[in-house]
Amino acid sequence: MKAVIAWLPGDGAGPEVLREARRVLDVIASEHNHEFEFIEGDIGGIAIERHGEPLPKATQDLCLKSNAVFLGTVGDPKYDHLPPGKKCENGLLDLRKLLGNYANLRPVTVFEPLVDSSPLRRDCVRGVDLVIVRELLGGIYFGAPRGIEDGHAFNTEIYSRDEVRRIARVAFKLARHRRRRVTSVDKANVLEASVLWREACTEISKQFPDVAFTNMYVDNCAMQLIAKPAQFDVILTKTKIGDILSAEASMLAGSLGLLP
């Protein structure tokens, strides 16, 4: 049986990352008698150059008819002047909406041969193995209204209880196959959206009594990731917080580039 894979190298290091992924898939195909068909599409800056938009319809159609989508990365400083909604990163955001990708799993594992790649001490990062479960389709990146008007800029963070529940279930189910610990990260002492987030996650936690559950404020989590990262198993959080914390956590392994 042949699997069709939409192949979206994108910009920057994207083509390099997917080139290595292709080597892995070629081995899998050979060892397990699979057949993969790779169909390339444009996204991000390269799509703007060729088609005038970051996610052209041809790429959308390709992704919808494929069995899987492999994406490198998007973005280039030469497009930073473009207005919101037209930037390279919108290709990524629009693709998430198109495919309904609400759960982003971001693992950070410090392998022993690479333990000295981190700028932190060996005894701090050795044995770190965590996953950040980041909600992708709600929150401030997608909330409306948003804009710039009369010298003011505004963005809106919106979450429904059901959106929080579904991402929480992903985190708890994942934890059952790991070390059975979930830490939900929010800013419930300041933001109403985080109050709802905390309530909904706590509600779902009761369906998984075999998984230890704690809540943590994002500022404390940012410190704990540096001070004692090995305490974390599964971190469950919102899209903006997860974006920032996963970039911070990448330094435990050495860099964002080392994670793949």
Image (tube, rainbow, N blue to C red):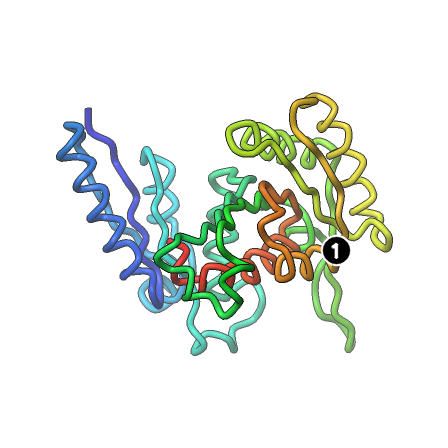
- Residue at the image position 65 percent from the left and 28 percent from the top: 211
Residue 91 located left or right of residue 72: right
Which residue is nearer to you in this view: 207 or 147? 207
Residue 67, percent across and down?
32, 33
130 left or right, relative to 14: right
In the image, is residue 13 above or below residue 179?
A: below
Q: Nearer the viewer, residue 93 or 1?
A: 1
- Give the class, few, some or many, for how many residues have Cα within 10 Å of label 1's Cα (few <14, many ≥20): some
The residue at 66%/48% (across/down) is 238
Quadrant in which the N terminus is drawn: top left
Residue at 56% from the left image edge and 34% from the top image edge: 179
- Is any part of residue 53 visible from this angle? no
Q: Residue at x 57, y 62 (%)?
A: 248
Q: Nearer the viewer, residue 188 or 117?
A: 117
**Residue 80 versus residue 35: which sits nearer the camera?**
35
Residue beneath label 1, please?
Answer: 156
Name which residue type carries label 1: Thr
Residue 220 appears at what percent x and percent y? 74, 57
Q: In this rendering, is residue 207 above or below 17? A: above
Q: Secondary structure at mark 1?
A: loop
Residue 248 higher or lower than 142, as above or below: below
The image quarter containing residue 137 is top right
